[in-house]
Image: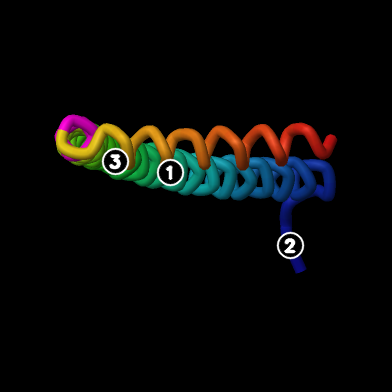
C-alpha cells in the first residue's frame, strides 16, 4: 500500500494525468501541423499542374485558331477564284442555296 496520504496521492495522480494529456495534445498538434504542411504542398503542386495545363490548352487553342483562320482564308480564295472562272455557275449555286433557305424559312 502507498505511504502517502490519500489527498497527496490524488494530487500526484492528477498531475501525472495532466502531464500525459499535455504530452498527447502536443503530439496531436505536431501531427496536425505536419498534415497541414503536406496539404499545403499538395495544393501547391495541384495549382502548378492546373496552371501548366491551362497554359498548354491556351497555346493549343491559339494554334488551332490560327490553323482554322489559314484554312478559311484558303477556302475563301479558292471560292473567289472559282467565281471568277465560272461566274454563271456560281450564280446558279447561290440562287439554289437562297431558294432552299427561303423555302425552309417559309415553312414556319
Q: Residue furthest front?
A: 88
Look at mark 2 in the image and give the residue it sits on.
2
Residue 3 falls left or right of residue 49: right
Q: Residue furthest bottom?
A: 1
The structure residue drawn at horizontal position 60% and vertical position 49%, both measured from the top left corner, is: 20
The structure residue drawn at horizontal position 74% and vertical position 41%, both measured from the top left corner, is: 11
Q: Which mark is residue 57?
A: 3
Image location (x, y in percent) of residue 31: 47, 48
Where, by quadrant of the figure, is residue 59 drawn? top left
Nearest-to-viewer mark from 1 and 2: 1
Asked if disc 1 and disc 3 are in contact, CB closer than 8 Å, the reply is no
Image location (x, y in percent) of residue 40: 39, 37
Residue 23 falls left or right of residue 65: right
Asked if disc 2 and disc 3 are in contact, CB closer than 8 Å, the reply is no
Q: Considering depth in this image, is 36 or 1 the residue closer to the camera?
A: 36
Q: Considering depth in this image, is 51 or 5 the residue closer to the camera?
A: 51
Tell me which label, 1 or 2, sits earlier in the chain: 2
Look at mark 1 in the image and give the residue it sits on.
39
What span is colored magenta in the figure?
78-84
Q: Say what secondary structure mark 1 lies in.
A: helix
Q: Say what secondary structure mark 2 lies in.
A: loop
> Is residue 48 something that shows in the picture?
no
Q: Considering depth in this image, is 63 or 76 the residue closer to the camera?
A: 76
The C terminus: image quadrant: top right
Q: Disc 2 and disc 3: Cα gap in Å?
A: 76 Å
As for residue 80 lying within the magenta part, the answer is yes
The N terminus: image quadrant: bottom right
Q: Say what secondary structure mark 3 lies in.
A: helix
Crowd class of label 1 (few under 14; some 14 to 19; many from 20; radius 10 Å): few
Q: Is residue 41 above or below residue 87?
A: below
Amino acid at each position: 500500500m502507498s505511504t502517502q496520504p490519500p489527498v497527496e496521492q490524488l494530487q500526484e495522480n492528477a498531475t501525472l494525468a495532466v502531464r500525459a494529456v499535455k504530452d498527447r495534445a502536443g503530439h496531436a498538434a505536431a501531427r496536425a501541423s505536419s498534415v497541414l504542411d503536406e496539404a499545403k504542398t499538395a495544393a501547391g503542386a495541384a495549382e502548378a499542374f492546373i496552371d501548366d495545363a491551362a497554359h498548354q490548352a491556351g497555346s493549343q487553342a491559339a494554334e488551332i485558331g490560327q490553323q482554322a483562320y489559314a484554312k478559311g482564308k484558303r477556302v475563301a480564295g479558292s471560292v473567289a477564284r472559282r467565281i471568277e472562272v465560272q461566274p454563271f455557275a456560281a450564280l446558279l449555286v447561290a440562287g439554289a442555296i437562297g431558294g432552299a433557305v427561303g423555302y425552309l424559312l417559309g415553312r414556319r
